[in-house]
Image (cartoon, rainbow, N blue to C red):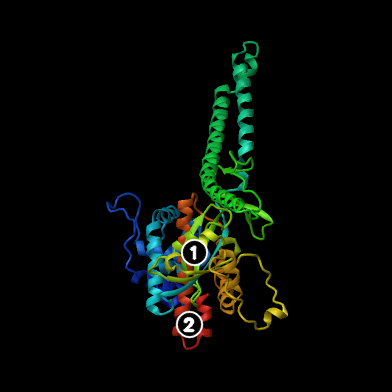
Amino acid sequence: MLLPPDLRDWLPEGHLVHFIVDAVAALPLQGFRVNERGTGSEQYPPAMMLSLLIYCYATGRMGSRQIEAATYTDVAVRYTCGGDLHPDHDTICTFRRQNGVLFSESFVKVLAYAQELGVLKKRGGVSVDGTKIAADASKHSAVSYQRAGEMIAELEKEVQELMALAESADRAPEAAKLNVPAELARRKDRQAKLAQARETIEARFEERRQEQQEEYEKKRAAYEAKREQHKHAGREPQPPANQPDDKAQHNFTDPQSRIMKAGSGEHFEQAYNAQAAVDTEGSMLILGVHVTDAPNDKQQLIPTLQSVDPVAREITEALADTGYFSESAVRKVEADGGPIVYAAVEKCGHHRSVSDLLERADPPLPPDTAAVTEKMRQRLRTVAGKAKYALRKQTVEPVFGIIKSVMGFRQFSLRGRAKVSLEWTLVALAYNFKRLARLVYLMRSPNPDAMRVSMA
């Protein structure tokens, strides 16, 4: 081996890295952030850096140090870097942090590319769902609203004790053993951080309280209207609380993350709620993403659908589980000829009884004056409604399974909702490249089974 070998000879023809490098080179991208002055740290071709991140995320390497090490030890990763370039972890992390616009642009253009290849339809349905992804912060770094107040009071007492100790001439030898100014400064700093934590919780609560107040006033008006008509008005609506719950949390490491139920709901973790809209027309590509700090999906139907760029999909139908259903959200989505929503209004078991297997006539349409809940229940009991809703668990749930179990993405590397959103877009972009490569090879290969090893 007197001359360096061509790395392409070391990789199978159908290898994923070939598709990623060629596709990135073909995309007309404009959103790269580079140092135009050419000063400072060494710079690398932006397309190379994007290909490097996409391939590494698609193959389960998200840490910048992991990626740097792979540029020396992994043939496919070396291929993305031209064989002899090795960006350090700081360069990789900086490129990832500063190129959110590029990732969003790439995300849309890859989907447009999929349409050109004929594997993604311009019109059709989407399936929406969310999954909890751990934040880069421990739940043990959090403090509750009540505990923060208690700790502030405890620290104030300690400050008074230290000041009394410093002022007492009789106890000068004891004070000399302590660095009283340093101890005072440490406690004052801790008090300031705890006070800021309480202010953050209060500001977050006030924002949510205003939304709850508007909803309460609507419910109250409807309740009073029914009472005036001498109808059964149900339980009287209750106004929102006037102060945060004692258990409301603030995390010092990543203040914008929240403690959420995760997995089967049997444990809690510091996390974000990552949302995705997935194609239901056969490709299983992710068409839209967004990240929220809300622990449930009740308010996420509209923003998740809005995350789908019209270039990627003209949505005709939206499928969602019961966690997304609310009458107001369904009305807004379907207004002015919007997509038809198929959202469960109640939890149903997966078991199908014998009666469920038998063909039945569709239930009659409810009157136009019926509530959205009644109309949705009837819609999901029709043969067409059942068939469409069944696509939900066949599309979006497997996508989350691939991202978490195959790609290995279970924790964000960045902090703060804006940066976390950027990374979630990068994860979805890597998934789409991985999925699109497989769709293209299956479409073009006369023997799809022969390609499976090289596509792994």
Q: Residue at x 38, y 73 (%)?
A: 113
Identified at 38% across, 58% down, the residue is: 101
Q: Is residue 301 above or below residue 23?
A: above
Mark 1 element type: helix
Query: Where in the figure is residue 263, as x and y percent of width and height?
Result: 64, 60
- Local packing at callout 1 (Cα closer than 10 Å; few below 14, some 14-19, many 20+) is many
* In this picture, residue 111 sits left or right of residue 324: left
Local secondary structure at mark 2: helix
Write down the residue under mark 2: 442
Amino acid type at image mark 2: Leu
Instruction: Give me the residue at 59% from left, 44% from top.
Output: 239
Task: Name the residue at the front extreme.
Answer: 229
On residue 57, which mark appears?
A: 1
| Residue found farthest to the left | 37
Camera-nearest residue between 279 and 68: 279
Query: Residue 335: percent from the left, percent from the top?
Result: 45, 64
Residue 352 against residue 71 in the figure, above or below: below
Most distant residue in the right direction: 354
Of residues 130 and 255, the one drawn nearer to the viewer in this rendering: 130
Q: CA distance from mark 2 to mark 1?
A: 22 Å
Q: Which quadrant does the N terminus fall into?
A: bottom left
Say which of 109 and 43 sits in front. 109
Q: Specify the amino acid type for callout 1.
A: Tyr
Residues at circles 2 and 1 in contact by the CB criterion of under 8 Å: no
**Chain-order first, disc 2 or disc 1:** 1
Write the residue at 45% across / 57% down: 422
